[in-house]
Image: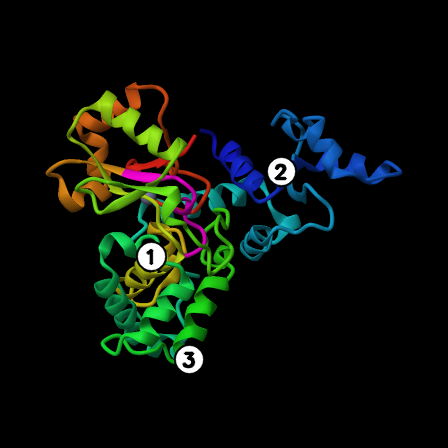
Amino acid sequence: MKKRNFLQALLATAGMTLVASRTVQNSLDSPHPAPIELAAAGLEDMPASVEQEELQLVALQENELNPAYRHIEREVKINQLTEANAEQVVTDYLDKIRNFDANFKGDIFITETQRQLLKPTLARIDRVLNYVGYANFNLLSFDEMLFFARNYPGIGPFEKTEIAFLEEIFYADATNYGFFGEKVAPEINHRIAQRDVEKIESSGHYLLKGESLTHFLQIRQDVGPDLLLTSGIRNNVKQMHLFLAKAVQAEGNLSRASRSLAPPGHSFHSSGDFDVGKAGLGELNFTADFSHTEEFIRLIRLGYVDIRYTDDNKFGVRYEPWHIKLV
Ligand SMILES: [Zn+2]
């Protein structure tokens, strides 16, 4: 894909578009400058041959600045965005998601106060996990986690500072990290009812009844019995646990963590997406290795399966061939 087209697509997710300067000029001349109309008319697709074309970022909807817009604005001085630095923005962006486990200039780290809370808080959540069990932990709501901690001496109640830390992480603007996905479960105490899910035998995971479950069963039937469910529905507590563990691994680099994993509240696992793998492949199921398996090749050939985080996606996330998007 041409870099310019890619940037165009990336910005579209932030509610923005690239327009040629001549288009902008026209809009300023008109009595009602309305970038959204220009975009709708396809004028932003003016041929690249327009003389001395300069690219500019224009918010698609006036008065509605998507947080991702502010993020990009920090990287590029808006009215100085030229074809050349647009290329650089895209090159840097792709470099990050292709080398997701590296540190990059501008990455966001946890604060010193948060750093001190990270391990004890994570250890307390681990104790909740051990108490409720691996499968149930996927469904646990925030209030239920606090309840178990309060009532079982082996866990011990969360300190006020620990709860505040978890809330800070949950409510942080993930676009600051460089993550551009949607906030799917914005309520910290999002609940998943037991009656709405079904446990998948020998997987330790649940799937939402309805489309999600049907989709998985169909895929397993068509690909074969070696196709496993490696992660099903996950509530915010589970996602928080995964994200904090990743943050520890990344030595407090939250941008690096968010290139591998949606920050809590942003995971489509809360609404029906699921992960699949090949029996026997173990942890490698969560690497690009999965895309070289016979199971993955069959899965793609089915024609009806979508991957949420494709190669070079627009969400700031690594390639996840194992993560099935609920259609
Ligand atoms: Zn996943």
Q: Residue 238 shows which numbered tag? A: 1
User: What amino acid is at disc 3?
Assistant: Thr
Instruction: Check disc 3 and report its element: helix, strand or loop.
Output: helix
Residue 22 sits inside the magenta stretch: no
Say whether mark 1 is within 8 Å of ligand 1.
no
The residue identified by callout 2 is: 18
Secondary structure at badge 1 equals helix
Front position in the image: 13 or 238: 238
Total numbered labels placed on residues in the image: 3
> Can you tell which quarter of the image residue 268 is in?
top left
Magenta-drawn segment: 264-275
Observer-nearest of 79 and 205: 205
> Circle 3 is placed at which residue position?
161
Residue type, label 1: Lys
* In the image: residue 226, left or right of residue 111: left
Query: Image point 66% across, 49% down: which residue?
Result: 79
The answer for how far apart the CA atoms under marks 1 and 3 are is: 20 Å
Q: Indicate whether 21 appears above or below 122.
A: above
